[in-house]
Image (cartoon, helix red, strand yellow):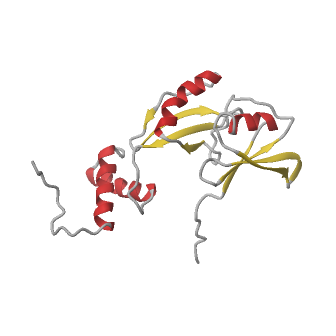
Amino acid sequence: MRKIQAQGVHHITLNGADRQTSIDFWEGVLGMPFIFDQPNLDNPNEGHLYFDPGDGRLITIFTDETRSADPAGNPRDPGTVHHIAFNVSRASLTHALDRLDTRGIAHTKIKDRGFMDSVYFRDPLGLTIELACYKFEPPVGCTHADVMIRAHKMRVAAGDYNIQEVHLADAIEALVDERQESLSPDRNAKNPY
């Protein structure tokens, strides 16, 4: 038996409201360029809109002109989507609350998640959307996942409840030590003062 190796998310498709509500939310609120439009090839009564969330991957929305905005909320049953998180810069996150307030969109305050900060709100059909901003940049040649797994191992070894910034800092230092050679015979911390 062999695995089928995934190499990233190709796209996520959501059931949206009508066409204009979907464009107004995904491009008009979240700034995702509307890049492709065609019918839903499995249901000719629906449209299929494609948006770029900022990394060249795709978020696609099935639209139906008989569906309208209803932010009452999605079911939280097992097997359903709880929320979708989008990466944003620190600058965007700090201004998100005012920009959501201007539109009258209810949201949480910025929540500290240890390794990232987040804001939550709902799309026009009640799907929870998270705007997430990492508190760290991975070293060159590493990914956020490389830092996260190393920080997780350090957190568990320390017996801490969740990942904190100290785990991230230590993980980044360890990754740099492993991946970047140095001419110094002793790379330990020093006090030059």
Q: Residue at x 34, y 57 (%)?
A: 153
Q: How many marks?
A: 0
Q: Residue 94, image x and y in percent? A: 48, 31
Q: Residue 116, image x and y in percent? A: 43, 42
**The one of 136 and 85 positioned closer to us in this rendering:** 136
Q: Residue at x 63, y 39 (%)?
A: 76
Q: Residue at x 58, y 27 (%)?
A: 99
**The one of 153 and 12 positioned closer to us in this rendering:** 12
**The one of 80 and 86 positioned closer to us in this rendering:** 86
Q: Residue at x 33, y 44 (%)?
A: 165
Q: Is residue 5 left or right of residue 153?
A: right
Q: Residue 176, image x and y in percent? A: 31, 61
Q: Residue furthest bottom?
A: 1
Image quadrant in which you'd find residue 23: top right
Q: Residue furthest right?
A: 44
Image quadrant in which you'd find residue 100: top right
Q: Is residue 98 above or below residue 86?
A: above
Image quadrant in which you'd find residue 141: bottom left
Q: Is residue 95 above or below residue 1?
A: above
Q: Quadrant of the N terminus?
A: bottom right
Q: Is residue 146 left or right of residue 165?
A: right
Q: Is residue 122 left or right of residue 116?
A: right
Q: Residue furthest left?
A: 193
Q: Residue 167, image x and y in percent? A: 31, 49
